[in-house]
Amino acid sequence: MKLSDFFDDDIDRKALREEAIECYRKYINPTYVDMLSMASLDIVEWEREGAYIRDLSGEEFIDCVEGAGCFNIGRHNKEVAEVIKKAVDRFDMGGWIGMIPQRAALAEKLAKICPKGLQYSFFTSGGGEAIDTAIKFAKGAAGKQQIISTINGYHGHTGYALSATGRDIYKGPFLPLMPGFTHVPYNDLNALKAAINDETAGVIMETIQGEGGIIVPDDDYLPGVRKLCDKHNIIMILDEVQTGLGRTGRMFGCEHWNVTPDIMVLSKSFTAGYLPISVTVFNEKVAEFTNANPTIHGNSHGGTSITCLASLAGIEYIEKNDLCRNAETMGKNLMEGLNKLKEKYPGFVKDVRGKGLMIGIEFPNDDIGPLMSAEIRKNGVITIFTFMNPKVVRIMPTLVITEKEVAKILDAYDKSMEVISEQV
Ligand SMILES: Cc1ncc(COP(=O)(O)O)c(C=O)c1O
């Protein structure tokens, strides 16, 4: 394969597809290719637009996976693309030691849109790296070492993030991980209370558990966590990597419960769907530590001139197009339709839950999620089961989705449920 293949309108797409798969097998990971194929997710993306992706074979799908929420403003957003083109014409990434105005502008924007008090930003490149940053800052600010996180919580595969992740299967060959982590059941205030001790520096959790199966907490949970953290002088970290930037029908998931953490982490859609960037935002209490230790943590690529301008453009796109409201409205439409399917296929659909356009459908057992994902693909929609809870299939389409596209998704689910409910 060569660079010019990607800009050649007359390229033989089917041949390029075969070649790409072959290179994946040879140079990336053959077992991964087999796994994708078994899950009917062996798609080789080519064109991407709005809610849709098209495989190199020409097959077109509504993308309800979206990299688990990386494309809130739609696939290949043209407005952001124009900003990136202009930015690349003028700037390179910028130095990491000196100051760059684009980073300042994005930090200012974040302080304006984040829940009040989250004034400071530290930029990184991926979600895991930003979680690592959050945990380091919490330990530094508290002057203590113990972190409480949640069973089935997912925070990424880097050092502290993997230690916080509540699933042993990802950890086995790498033990021992970072010391000082305790995992408690999510949505259980008593368990959290019992785990707190004099050494507790912070608690970290997702605002809604994503990979754990789209678990929306009870209404008293996050406010209760906030109260416990205040009472025991503990840093509260919310991982909004999936729930942030409009996904749940609010700019940030925690707004549903009027809870402001001490530290909040954003990534995924913060990249505006193009370039890697993540951020750890935090309040004055945490800033006392970072202000006293301005070079204790750092990186080369966090918040470059280009990524910051792309992120600013992405946030402006969400605001200008009122995408939080669209996520709320389209999410309601989807939930209504899915609940009707729950009635139509009693016993087969156990639960439909979520907020905005972060929706999970729970089936009776772990085998059904993958079967449903495969069947839905035949009906022109890509969805995937949640990795830590395969009986739940997630629906996370772009926030620019229309009523017509929601109807197509529901139709694909109906047809697929008719087939799979007969087989199991
Ligand atoms: C809730 C949550 N936190 C953290 C991460 C890690 O982000 P990344 O894959 O960018 O390292 C993810 C990734 O899926 C996530 O869903």
Image (cartoon, rainbow, N blue to C red):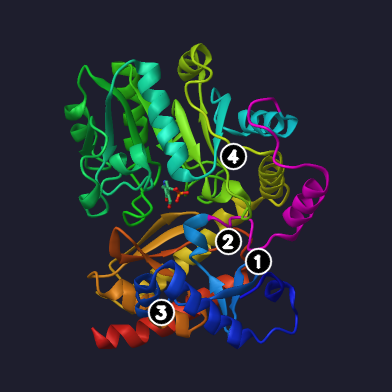
Q: Are marks 3 and 2 in contact (CB under 8 Å)?
A: no
Mark earlier in primary sequence (1, 3): 3
Name the kind of residue labelled 4 in the image.
His
Closer to the N terminus: mark 3 or mark 2? 3
Q: Earlier in the sequence, mark 4 or mark 2?
A: 4
At numbered mark 2, what does the secondary structure look like: helix, strand or loop? loop
Question: Dot 2 corresponds to which residue?
Answer: 398
Residue 9 rendering spot, x and y as whole percentages = 75, 80
The answer to whether the residue labelled 1 contacts the one labelled 2, judged by CB atoms less than 8 Å apart, is: yes
Mark 1 or mark 3: which is in front?
Answer: 3
Q: Is residue 317 above or below residue 130?
A: below
Residue of label 1: 50
76 drawn magenta? yes
Residue 401 in view (yes/no): yes
Rounded to the nearest angstrom, the CA distance separating label 1 from label 2 is: 7 Å
Q: Are marks 1 and 3 in contact (CB under 8 Å)?
A: no
Reply above or below: 414 against 366: below
Magenta span includes 337: no
Q: Quadrant of the N terminus?
A: bottom right
First reached walking from the N terminus: tag 3 or tag 4: 3
Q: Which residue is mark 4?
A: 301
Task: Tell me if the residue at label 4 has its CB under 8 Å from ligand 1.
Answer: no
| Segment tinted magenta in the rendering | 70-99
Q: Residue 187's x, y, as percent? A: 27, 42
291 displayed left or right of 201: right
- Kind of residue sitting beneath label 2: Thr
Q: Is residue 173 left or right of residue 307?
A: left
